[in-house]
Image (cartoon, helix red, strand yellow):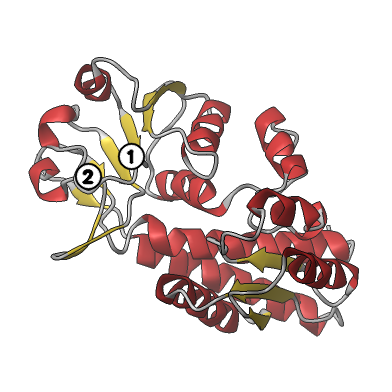
Amino acid sequence: METKIIDGKQIAKEIRIELKHKVKELMAQGYPQPKLSVILVGNDPASETYVRNKIKACEKVGIESEQILMDASVSQETLLAEIRRLNEDPSVNGILVQLPLPKQIDVDAVIQTIDPAKDVDGFHIENVGSMTVGDGRGYIPCTPGGVIELLKRSGITIDGKQCVVVGRSNLVGKPAAILLLQENGTVTICHSHTKNLTEICQGADILVVAIGRAHFINGSQIKEGAAVIDVGINRTDAGLVGDVDTASCMGIAGAITPVPGGVGPMTIAMLMKNTMEAYQVQNHIA
């Protein structure tokens, strides 16, 4: 069997182009430029890279970006005060605080302080609730949203399929399962206490792996013809690798995402999409 490589870079580019046209169209009608504010606390190299990529994506789409740098020793109250200032600034459509944060900061307090209408990461409890009930009012977390978009734009049907999610984190695993369920997939969630993991994975038409362990899943554990979505990003001596041993899946999987170049670019593309949705809501644009 020939395994299709799902090109996340190309699909993310297509989304950026669509959004760029929308920005140009709306600004030509006299609407202001969309704006995303990103807060980066400390100087973690990985976080700096992620923020830099988000700023570059904004430039490509035509979204104004603002990077707010804060020292690693910043107090929680100072950080929360800055978030409240951005909440009140009508020119700011989206607010993002790059994670992880220093130990003295309560991450949940930070997330819940962001105005849900500007929470383009989709982490605020109101947005999580909207996603869970499927009312369409909130913003979907970017990585799980990117997983669904990859599947749809690759022509992979979710409706009626057996879907297995390996990993139950609040940021990826749980929301991915909810979104697959909303697309009429039959969903099983696996985690560290799951028995017969291999047997369950072998029954999946769509396998989403987000467990944070390098090459945790291999070709012997997947069903022939399955779509395999690898969310993992693990830094090893050999470079960046996913949670799936891609090489062992070639010729077995029907489609698979590479690492890097699969889900990663989609996460940033969905951030741009959420920012545009927030901008349109705030400017009362249908």
Residue at the image point whose x is 72% and y is 69% from the top: 75
Q: Is residue 122 visible?
A: no
From this view, report whether residue 204 is shown above or below residue 101.
above
Do the numbered discs 2 and 1 sit on residues whose CB atoms are within 8 Å? yes
Occupied quadrant, residue 217: top left
Residue 233, horizontal then vertical, whole percent: 32, 56
Give the number of callouts. Answer: 2
Residue at the image point whose x is 22% and y is 44% from the top: 244
Residue 13 or 53: which is nearer the viewer? 53
Residue 244, label in figure: 2
Crowding at dot 2, Cα within 10 Å, few <14 / some 14-19 / many 20+, comes out as many
Residue 153, horizontal then vertical, whole percent: 43, 50
Pick the quarter of the image with the C terminus: bottom right
Type of the residue with mark 1? Val
Residue at the image point whose x is 33% and y is 46% from the top: 212
Pick the quarter of the image with the N terminus: top left
Q: Is residue 145 visible?
A: yes
The residue identified by callout 1 is 209
Q: Is mark 1 on a helix, strand or loop?
A: strand
From this view, report whether residue 126 is shown above or below residue 120.
above
Asked whether, in this view, residue 221 is left or right of residue 137, the answer is left
Residue 111, horizontal then vertical, whole percent: 70, 53
Spatial separation of the CA atoms under disc 2 and disc 1: 7 Å
Q: Is mark 2 on a helix, strand or loop?
A: loop
Type of the residue with mark 2? Val
Residue 124, label in figure: none
